[in-house]
Structures are given as C-alpha cells and as structure tokens.
Amino acid sequence: MKHQMEEIHLEFEDRGIKLKLRGDNHLEQVIIDGSEDTRVKDVINKALKEVQKKVAKKMQGELGELGIPGLK
C-alpha cells in the first residue's frame, strides 16, 4: 500500500509557488518564483513527519482502547 501511495504524484501551483507532492504526503519540490527552495521543502517534510507520528500515536491509543489484540 505504501508503494502505491508513493506512486501518486501531484503538481500544484498558486501565486508563484509550485509544489510537487507524492500521495504519501512527501513534498518532493518547492519552487518559489522560479527558484527551487530546498530549505522550505526540508522543513515542511520534517513537520509532516512529526505530525504523522502524533497522529499514529493517537490512533494507536484509540484503537488500543477498543481492546483489539496487538494494537496496544
């Protein structure tokens, strides 16, 4: 499933900013006014990774409360 999500690509452009994203919420490229900005890309990817960890932890806790074996 993860590999399938990585294969989904999207380019989005608005007000001079162009983003290239993958379906697994990974930002591949940020272009601002025609110039690639790897610092912005790296910071956004780090933030996305952190929020994904928090979501996973919360989901794990909520699923654990359901009493399903192996999800605690």
Image (cartoon, helix red, strand yellow):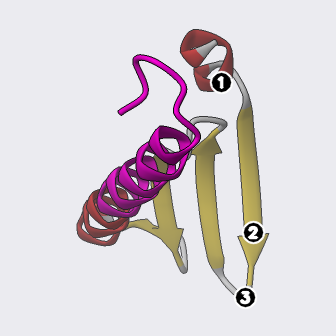
Which residue is the site of mark 1? Answer: 5
Q: Position of residue 38 (x, y in %)?
A: 28, 60
Q: Secondary structure at mark 1?
A: helix
Choose the circle earlier in sequence order: 1 or 2. Answer: 1
Q: Vertically, is 8 above or below 54?
A: above
Residue at left offset 51%, top offset 49%: 59
Disc 2 crowd, CA 10 A, few/some/many (<14, 14-19, 20+): few
Label 2 amino acid?
A: Glu
**What residue occupies the far front of the structure in this picture?**
67
Q: Vertically, is 5 above or below 57?
A: above
Residue at left offset 35%, top offset 33%: 72
Alpha carbons under labels 2 and 3: distance apart: 7 Å
Q: Is residue 27 left or right of residue 54?
A: right
Label 3 amino acid?
A: Arg
Quarter of the picture containing the N terminus is top right
- Point out which mark residue 43 bears: none
Residue at left offset 52%, top offset 33%: 67
Which residue is the site of mark 2? Answer: 13
Q: Position of residue 12 (x, y in %)?
A: 75, 61
- Point out which mark residue 15 bears: 3
Label 1 amino acid?
A: Met
Q: Position of residue 4 (x, y in %)?
A: 67, 13
Tag 2 and tag 3, C-beta contact below 8 Å: no
In this view, the residue in front, 32 or 10, is 10
Q: Secondary structure at mark 2?
A: strand
Q: Is residue 13 magenta?
A: no
Span of residues in magenta: 48-72
For the stretch drawn in magenta, the main secondary structure is: helix
Residue at left offset 73%, top offset 50%: 11
